[in-house]
Image (cartoon, grey):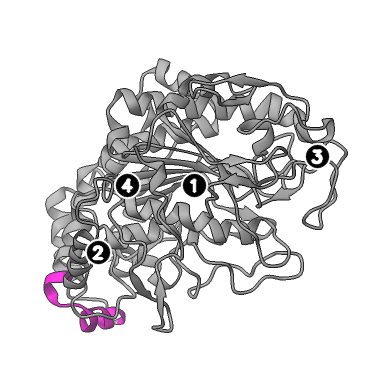
């Protein structure tokens, strides 16, 4: 049954089986074209690409990335305990962990990241991520800022946002999905293994917003460490390809509720859309990429037989299959139990980092970098590992209105760290430096918008291009500067 995002029953074309409706087909990531009001969308798309290529002509890094794998560590990892130790700081700042040397000369990281210490020769460690929020800052607002490049419009006194809606700014993967359309029958944008969430707000900053649901990610919300069900991407055995092709042709002429689509697009565009949808189902590429049983046991063991590790392995397989943008969310809920999954270490910081977070992050991220490098995937894939903010250098204090235990750390967007690799990013380099307490950048500050602008640039998208929101108002794709110093 073809039912890509919805888990509800679909309407039948034939009385004896389940066939895809046109409305259902529009749920297939950026293969859909719903919500577009320009009659010549594909021509506009080509013109935008040509303008960007001319603007950045001569730059070897523009468009160096064919794909992007974004690893989002939701909850706010403690940069000072993981990536940016300060052994000479006072005890209530430096914490319990000791620094260890890395493959980057003169750069030390936390002692519970030994594998990444040896894998940093393939990446750049940014120690100067920084931004100053407006008012209180909690996870949802920070996630929205990090992934869309815009501050949220409405923030409650607690820092919570309203649920996702069609007026939201699109997440980065949705923009890439629209502006860099797929030429092969693969899923353009995949998010796994769970949605972004803080308390009851689910998916804020992780959807296509005013671009329309056609550019939402394919949401693979299953645990890759368990048996994964792939019926959504499978062709039923009793339906031969020829019969499915006939149904795709039939669907072009029915469903009056979609007449506005024909008004917005010419028939050539509609035919191209249906051809891609048909090919996606029959090619089996997405289904095969998500089938981890095709991997050797030794590789699955190297990534780690837990949700995060197997999610990164699936992410690599999707990139290898041609998916343009993959986002792997650390499987946690903000404000969740830090002893189980969440990076949100208010109540306890060092125990969870030592026994859970760092060992998993260390093993899985190092495995991904080594594996992608050996396969040659890092040459054309941008890998970005970052959270929405760091943690307060001083322990036991409140910086966001939350209470903290004596050994807990609160939210801290003023200085934190990120790891980037691939697609021309310098190997074995540290970019930027924090001050003596990891409280603020000492030099080369990188705003989240700057990181997003650099991601777009590497993917061949002009970060300064004009887009139109739901009110047809002109907006910049992102208000950030390209960090050219990250590239070799």
Kindly identify which residue carries mark 1. Answer: 221
Image quarter of residue 51: bottom left
Image quarter of residue 349: top right
Which of disc 4 and disc 3 is earlier in sequence? 4
Kindly identify which residue carries mark 4. Answer: 233
Q: Gap in Å between the C-alphas at discs 2 and 4?
A: 20 Å
Q: Comparing marks 1 and 3, which lies closer to the viewer?
A: 3
Kindly identify which residue carries mark 2. Answer: 14
Label 3 residue SS: loop
Q: Comparing marks 2 and 4, which lies closer to the viewer?
A: 4
Residue 23 on image: x %, y %: 33, 69
Residues rendered magenta in the picture: 257-269
Which of disc 2 and disc 1 is earlier in sequence? 2
Label 4 residue SS: helix
Question: Taking 292 as reference, is 262 above or below it?
Answer: below
Question: Taking 151 as reference, is 110 above or below it?
Answer: above
Label 2 residue SS: loop
Q: Residue at x 20, y 77 (%)?
A: 265
Q: Residue furthest right?
A: 406
Kindly identify which residue carries mark 3. Answer: 408
Which of disc 4 and disc 1 is earlier in sequence? 1
Residue 208 on image: x %, y %: 43, 65
Q: Gap in Å between the C-alphas at discs 1 and 4?
A: 14 Å
Q: Gap in Å between the C-alphas at discs 3 and 4?
A: 44 Å
Q: Residues within 10 Å of mark 3 (few under 14, many from 20)?
A: many
Q: Residues within 10 Å of mark 1 (few under 14, many from 20)?
A: some
The front one of 180 and 32 is: 180
Question: Taking 137 as reference, is 391 above or below it?
Answer: above
């Amino acid at each position: 049954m073809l039912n890509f995002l919805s888990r509800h029953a679909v309407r039948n074309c034939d009385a004896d089986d389940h066939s895809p409706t046109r409305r259902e087909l529009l749920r297939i990531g950026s293969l859909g074209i719903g919500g577009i009001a320009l009659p010549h969308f594909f021509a506009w798309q080509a013109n935008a690409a040509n303008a960007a290529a001319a603007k950045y002509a001569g730059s070897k890094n523009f468009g160096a990335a064919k794909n992007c794998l974004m690893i989002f560590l939701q909850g706010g990892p403690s940069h000072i305990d993981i990536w940016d130790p300060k052994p000479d700081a006072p005890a209530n700042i430096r914490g319990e962990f000791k620094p260890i040397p890395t493959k980057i000369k003169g750069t030390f990281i936390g002692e519970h990241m030994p594998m990444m210490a040896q894998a940093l020769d393939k990446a750049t460690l940014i120690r100067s991520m920084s931004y100053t929020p407006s008012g209180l800052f909690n996870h949802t607002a920070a996630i929205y800022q990090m992934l869309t490049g815009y501050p949220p419009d409405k923030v409650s006194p607690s820092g919570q946002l309203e649920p996702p809606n069609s007026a939201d700014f699109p997440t980065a993967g949705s923009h890439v999905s629209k502006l860099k359309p797929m030429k092969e029958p693969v899923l353009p944008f995949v998010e796994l293994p769970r949605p972004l969430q803080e308390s009851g707000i689910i998916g804020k900053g992780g959807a296509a917003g005013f671009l329309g649901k056609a550019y939402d990610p394919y949401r693979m919300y299953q645990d890759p460490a368990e048996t994964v069900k792939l019926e959504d991407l499978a062709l039923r055995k009793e339906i031969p390809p020829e019969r499915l092709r006939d149904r795709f042709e039939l669907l072009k002429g029915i469903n009056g509720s979609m007449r506005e689509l024909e008004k917005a697009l010419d028939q050539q565009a509609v035919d191209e859309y249906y051809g891609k949808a048909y090919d996606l189902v029959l090619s089996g590429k997405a289904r095969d990429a998500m089938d981890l049983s095709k991997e050797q046991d030794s590789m699955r063991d190297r990534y780690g037989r837990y949700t995060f590790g197997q999610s990164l392995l699936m992410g690599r397989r999707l990139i290898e299959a041609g998916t343009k943008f993959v986002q792997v969310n650390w499987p946690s809920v903000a404000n969740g139990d830090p002893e189980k999954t969440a990076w949100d270490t208010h109540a306890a910081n060092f125990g969870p980092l030592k026994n859970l977070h760092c060992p998993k992050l260390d093993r899985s991220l190092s495995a991904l970098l080594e594996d992608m490098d050996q396969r040659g995937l890092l040459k054309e894939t941008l890998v970005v590992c970052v959270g929405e903010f760091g943690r307060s250098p001083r322990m036991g204090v409140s910086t966001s209105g939350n209470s903290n235990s004596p050994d807990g750390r609160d939210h801290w967007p003023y200085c934190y760290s990120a790891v980037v690799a691939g697609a021309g990013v310098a190997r074995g380099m540290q970019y930027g430096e924090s001050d003596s307490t990891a409280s603020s950048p000492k030099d080369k500050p990188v705003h989240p918008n700057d990181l997003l602008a650099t991601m777009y640039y590497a993917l061949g998208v002009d970060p300064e291009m004009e887009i139109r929101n739901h009110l047809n108002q002109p907006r910049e794709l992102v208000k950030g500067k390209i960090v050219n110093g990250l590239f070799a």
